[in-house]
Image (cartoon, rainbow, N blue to C red):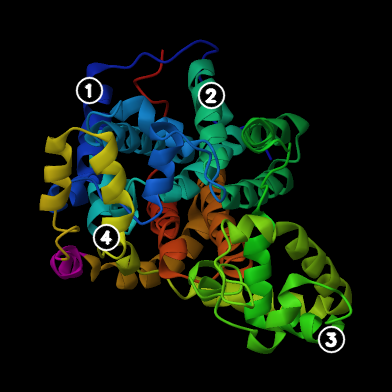
């Protein structure tokens, strides 16, 4: 492939007042669900990320990067600071993605794009939620920019995108699979060592971050010290691991042999139900941190299952990945389910009383957000359906970087489905968090190409 046009100088990019204002205005647009709610949106898992620095503790089931990011901007004063940083980062990445795909961007074009994404896609609902979910798409965009559009970034911008990419990938283990898939795409498209190395830099450095953090926090230099329990939950729910238990027990001597007749069960029930084999032994006694205690055995059962039933495992994973692709709706992130015992507790214990009052006054905590949000969610599915042929049209008519963006979006969405559906469990949230990449890529692939961004020095 020929080098792309729109090369910039080796130095930095001058942030013109119009550029800065457009990025900030785009951030405000992306945050609008939080204004609708009256407070930044949260999810049951938000408590674990806040606890990383407020308690502080190293949650057994969470990657280590997102909690410190939240703390860097809330300082136990208000979560609005964390939200402001998140949406500003996202708006800036959308600005650079427009330049990377089209060759240039103007403040008016940026605001138009942000308004379209806000009105028509799931993006703002995840941008306004204090969870690493929105970073799934950010990780893919960072790899795309570094691998396919580097000449359209200044040196300072490229370094900043690399740092954002490292953070986004390290924020959730599934993002490593997404980023690796887009790196593979860059290798195929670019066929240049430099492009491949630039694309691979973010996930490679994120791996080092994860290894170091888990060595410091858990005493083991591994990517996920307790990830085996989640894969076991999925494999027993799908059937292969349950069949392995029935076949090999009681001779294998595994703890779960006592529960072979109760398996398979739903993976969420297996992991989180107080009465599950993970949480309560065969005599009914509670097991403190039962998930962590079961990890060595989970690794052994997974290895045996893969050896005994490799094709059954592959079939189940493929089916779950396809099921995940069909679940793109926002809804399951909006209710107040379990928030009183999770996020509210951390806001109560870690922030001033006025913050708790604001949290409690929000539509989400009062159980009203799903109903209020429903009219704004209706365009999402029709837009997604329309985005498919438009993205394919962009592949046929767009420029080199525009086509690469469409392919990167498709690859990232597929990798996300494989990482979440096949290795965890299909949920609407997992697909909705990244599906916005498709309409974004379709719009930018069909937009006119431009010359160099006037904001570049």
Between discs 4 and 1, the one toward the N terminus:
1
In the picture of the structure, the residue carrying the numbered disc 3 is 247
> Do callouts 4 and 2 mark residues in contact (Cβ within 8 Å)?
no
Residue 400 vs residue 138, the one in the foreground = 138
Which secondary structure dominates the residues rendered in magenta? helix
Left or right of 166, for residue 43: left
Gap between marks 4 and 3 measured at Cα: 50 Å
Query: Is label 2 in a helix, a strand or a loop?
Result: helix
How would you rate the neighbour count of disc 3 (Cα within 10 Å): few for under 14, some for 14-19, many for 20 or more?
few
- Give the magenta part as a residue range: 368-376
Between discs 4 and 3, the one toward the N terminus:
4
Query: Is label 3 in a helix, a strand or a loop?
Result: helix
Residue 449 visible:
no
How would you rate the neighbour count of disc 1 (Cα within 10 Å): few for under 14, some for 14-19, many for 20 or more?
few
The residue sitting at 75% across, 35% down in the picture is 192
Residue 167 percent location from the top left of the image = 52, 34
* Label ID, residue 18: 1
Which of labels 1 and 2 is toward the front?
2
Q: Quadrant of the N terminus?
A: top right
In the picture of the structure, the residue carrying the numbered disc 2 is 158
């Amino acid at each position: 492939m020929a080098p792309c046009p729109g090369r910039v100088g080796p130095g930095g990019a001058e942030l013109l007042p119009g550029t800065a204002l457009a990025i900030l205005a785009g951030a405000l647009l992306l945050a609008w669900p939080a204004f609708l709610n009256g407070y930044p949106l949260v999810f049951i898992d938000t408590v674990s990320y806040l606890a990383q620095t407020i308690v502080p503790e190293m949650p057994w089931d969470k990657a280590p990067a997102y909690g410190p990011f939240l703390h860097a901007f809330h300082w136990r004063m208000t979560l609005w600071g964390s939200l402001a940083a998140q949406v500003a980062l996202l708006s800036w990445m959308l600005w650079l993605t427009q330049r990377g795909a089209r060759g240039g961007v103007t403040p008016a074009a940026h605001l138009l794009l942000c308004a379209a994404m806000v009105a028509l896609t799931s993006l703002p609902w995840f941008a306004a939620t204090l969870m690493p979910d929105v970073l799934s798409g950010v990780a893919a965009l960072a790899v795309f920019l570094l691998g396919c559009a580097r000449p359209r970034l200044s040196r300072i911008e490229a370094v900043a995108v690399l740092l954002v990419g490292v953070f986004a990938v390290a924020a959730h283990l599934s993002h490593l699979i997404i980023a690796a898939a887009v790196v593979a795409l860059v290798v195929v498209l670019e066929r240049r060592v430099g492009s491949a190395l630039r694309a691979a830099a973010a996930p490679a450095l994120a791996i080092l971050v994860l290894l170091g953090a888990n060595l410091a926090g858990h005493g083991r230099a591994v990517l996920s010290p307790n990830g085996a329990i989640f894969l076991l939950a999925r494999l027993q729910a799908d059937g292969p691991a349950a069949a392995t238990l029935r076949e090999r027990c009681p001779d294998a001597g595994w703890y779960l042999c006592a529960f072979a007749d109760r398996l398979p069960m739903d993976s969420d029930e297996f992991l989180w139900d107080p009465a599950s084999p993970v949480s309560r032994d065969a005599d009914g006694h509670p097991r403190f941190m039962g998930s962590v205690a079961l990890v060595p055995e989970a690794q052994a059962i997974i290895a045996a299952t893969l050896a005994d039933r490799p094709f059954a495992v592959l079939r189940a994973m493929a089916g779950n990945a396809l099921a995940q692709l069909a679940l793109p709706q926002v809804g399951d992130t909006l209710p107040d389910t379990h928030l009183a015992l999770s996020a509210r507790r951390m806001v109560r214990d870690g922030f001033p009383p006025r913050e708790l009052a604001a949290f409690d006054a929000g539509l989400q905590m009062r159980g009203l957000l799903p109903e209020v949000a429903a009219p704004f969610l209706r365009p999402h599915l029709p837009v997604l359906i329309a985005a498919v042929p438009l993205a394919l049209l962009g592949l046929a008519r767009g420029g080199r970087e525009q086509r690469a963006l469409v392919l990167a979006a498709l690859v990232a969405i597929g990798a996300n489905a494989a990482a979440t559906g096949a290795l965890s469990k299909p949920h609407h949230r997992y697909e909705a968090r990244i599906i916005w990449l498709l309409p974004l890529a379709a719009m930018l692939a069909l937009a006119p190409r431009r010359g160099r961004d006037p904001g570049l020095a």
